[in-house]
Image (tube, rainbow, N blue to C red):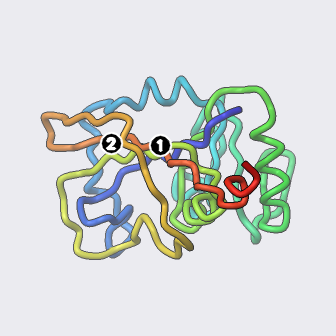
Amino acid sequence: MRKIILNLAVSLDGFIEGPNGEYDWCFTDDDYGMTAFFNDTDTLFIGRKSFELIGNNADTFPEKTVYIFSDTMKNNNELNIINSADFDETVQHILSQSGKNIWLFGGANLVSAFINKNLVTELILSIHPVILGGGKPLFHDIKSRIDLLLIDQQAFDSGLLQVKYALKPKFDMEMLKML
C-alpha cells in the first residue's frame, strides 16, 4: 500500500509559518533531500490555502497528481478537488491504487485531519534553527496521543535538522481480547 508522508519545514518552536503568514525563514540554500523525496512521490495532497499560496496552479508540481482538499472550490476539468463529505472514500480509493508515495503538503488543518484519521505513515520534519515566537502551529486539534518511532535524522551545516518518524501502530484492545 502507498504511504502518506508529511514533509515540511517547521521552526524550532513548532510553527509552519510566521505570525504574518511568512515563510522567509525557510532555507533554500540546499536541496535538503527534496529531490530524492520528490522522485519517490507521484501524488500530492494539499489544502486550499496552501494551494492558493503556491500560485493556484497544479503545474507547480509537474508529473504529480495533485488533489486539493476544499469545501469551497468547485471541481473542474483541470483540478482534482476533494471535499470533506468525500474525504474518507476518496483517500482510501487513492491509497488502494498502485503508485509511489503520497506527499501530504499541508496546511495545518489538513495535516490534523489526516493525523486524526490515522492516515499519515511517516513525518519528515525539517526543523529550522529559528524561533518565530508565533504563527501557525504545525499540530493543533489533535484528538489523541500519537507515538512516533525515529527512523532517521540528519544535521546540516546550516543548522537545519531533519528528522524522519514513522507513526507507531495503535494498540487494539479488541484484537487482544480475540487472541
At 75% from the left and 71% from the top, the residue drawn is 72
- Seen in the image, is 102 located left or right of residue 94? left
Nearer-the-camera pick, 31 or 3:
3
Q: Quadrant of residue 32?
A: top left
At 38% from the left and 40% from the top, the residue drawn is 164
Q: CA distance from mark 1 to mark 2?
A: 10 Å
Structural crowding at the residue carrying mark 2, measured as other residues with C-alpha within 10 Å and reported as few (<14), some (14–19) or many (≥20): some
Q: Quadrant of residue 12?
A: bottom left
Q: Which residue is mark 1?
A: 166
Q: Is residue 11 above or below residue 57?
A: below
Q: In which quadrant of the rendered image does the N terminus lie?
A: top right
> What amino acid is found at the position of numbered circle 1 in the picture?
Ala
Q: Is residue 99 above or below residue 96?
A: above
Secondary element type, mark 2: strand
> What amino acid is found at the position of numbered circle 2 in the picture?
Val
Q: Which residue is mark 2?
A: 163
At 33% from the left and 34% from the top, the residue drawn is 152
Q: Position of residue 25 (x, y in %)?
A: 25, 56
Structural crowding at the residue carrying mark 1, measured as other residues with C-alpha within 10 Å and reported as few (<14), some (14–19) or many (≥20): some
Q: Position of residue 55 (x, y in %)?
A: 56, 52
- Seen in the image, is 171 located left or right of residue 17? right
Q: Is residue 110 above or below residue 151?
A: below
Q: Position of residue 78 (x, y in %)?
A: 80, 45
